[in-house]
Every structure is written in structure tokens, then in C-alpha cells.
Image (cartoon, helix red, strand yellow):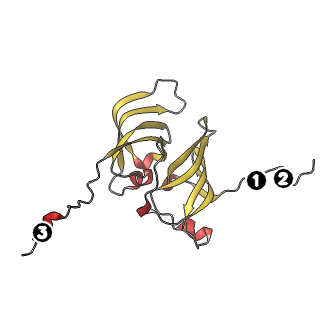
Amino acid sequence: MLGAGLDRYPVVVFNQIAAQPLDLTLYTDSFIIKGTVMTRYKRVTDVLSDPEHHFLVLTDATVDEYGSRAVATRTEFAQVNLATVLFAVSSVPVDPTPELRTIKVPEAALISIPPFRISGWIHLLPERSLAEALGELEARFLPVTDATYWSDTVGEARQTVPLLAFNQSRAQVLAPFRVVDPWAGVNS
């Protein structure tokens, strides 16, 4: 009899992971929006790069305008257009998921995404030239680890975070980055 004894095996239901809260800070051209998004994803880049969603709805949101002397706006919900997001920072580090892991090589990078600059490590596929590896980056939002971001234009001081995800379509320049000592080789 077909199906006899199948009740002894557990039923595995895929895509039934419960949504969890993820605290995010989103930076746009004009605003800093802090809040919580409910998501089934574990990685910030997955939340932001989901092709089915062009907006995020944050709960318990705070919206602050750069350079404003007014008090930040607090609201129960805020819908944010992902196309306007320059980059996002999560306040909670997320452990990598082993089954989603692809071997990559870290490369120091400087990203210009006006009015901000970001430096840190981007992770590229190995065994390619740097130009080829950069050309293969196709996700809407890309991760930068050990990231530092700042804006002299809007007066945002340097801040360092374990992970930042930037909007690749808003970045004007993504380039390899080397820290150089301007005094190296100068005899004292």
C-alpha cells in the first residue's frame, strides 16, 4: 500500500522560517532612518536585495534630516524606497550561514556614494583579475566588512561598523584601496 508507514517520518516544510526583527539604520541623500524590519532573511544584503521588494517598512522608526536643528520624527511605521537608500547598517552582527557560503577573497575598497565615502573590505570571487571580479558584482546591495563611513559634506563623523551594505546603483566609484603613508621614504 503506497504511503503506508510514512507517518513515522517528520514533515519538513520549507520557507516556513518565522520572521524575526532586524534593527537597521538606512542612509539616504537627505535622511537617516532608524527602525526595525521583520524578515525571514538572516543577512542584511538579502533583505535589501530581495528582487520582490522595492520598499521596506520599518516599525518604531526615527527619521532625521541631515543638518536639521529640528527634533527627529518618531513614527510607528515608515515605508522607505530602497532606490533612495545609499547604504544600510545593522546594529546586530549576523553570523554567516554555512550553506550560503561561497569562498571569496577580501579586497580593500573605497566606495564613493555621495555625499558619503566608505572604506572597508569587499569580498570577490577568487582566481579572477580584480577588474573581472569587480565586473561580476551584480547584487543590488553589496556588503562591506570592517567598514568605515563618513561625510565631510554633511558633517557625519567617521564611524566604523562590522558590516555595511551599500546600494551598488548609487555608488559612483568602487575602487581598490590602499592606505599609503605620505611620509614613507622621506628622510628626517
Tell me, for residue 5, which label it has, or none.
Answer: 3
Q: Are marks 2 and 1 in contact (CB under 8 Å)?
A: yes
- Is disc 2 placed on a helix, strand or loop? loop
> What residue sits right under mark 2 in the picture?
184
Q: Residue at x 48, y 41 (%)?
A: 91
- Marks 1 and 3 sit apart, C-alpha to C-alpha, by 68 Å
Three-letter amino acid code at the position of disc 3: Gly
Q: Sequence order check: which comes first, mark 2 or mark 3?
A: 3
C-alpha span from label 2 to label 3: 75 Å
User: Depth check: 99 or 156 in front?
Assistant: 99
Task: Give the CA distance from mark 2 to mark 1.
Answer: 8 Å
Report helix, strand or loop for mark 1: loop
CB under 8 Å between discs 1 and 3: no
Q: Which residue is mark 1?
A: 180
Quarter-of-image position of residue 61:
top left
Q: Earlier in the sequence, mark 1 or mark 3?
A: 3
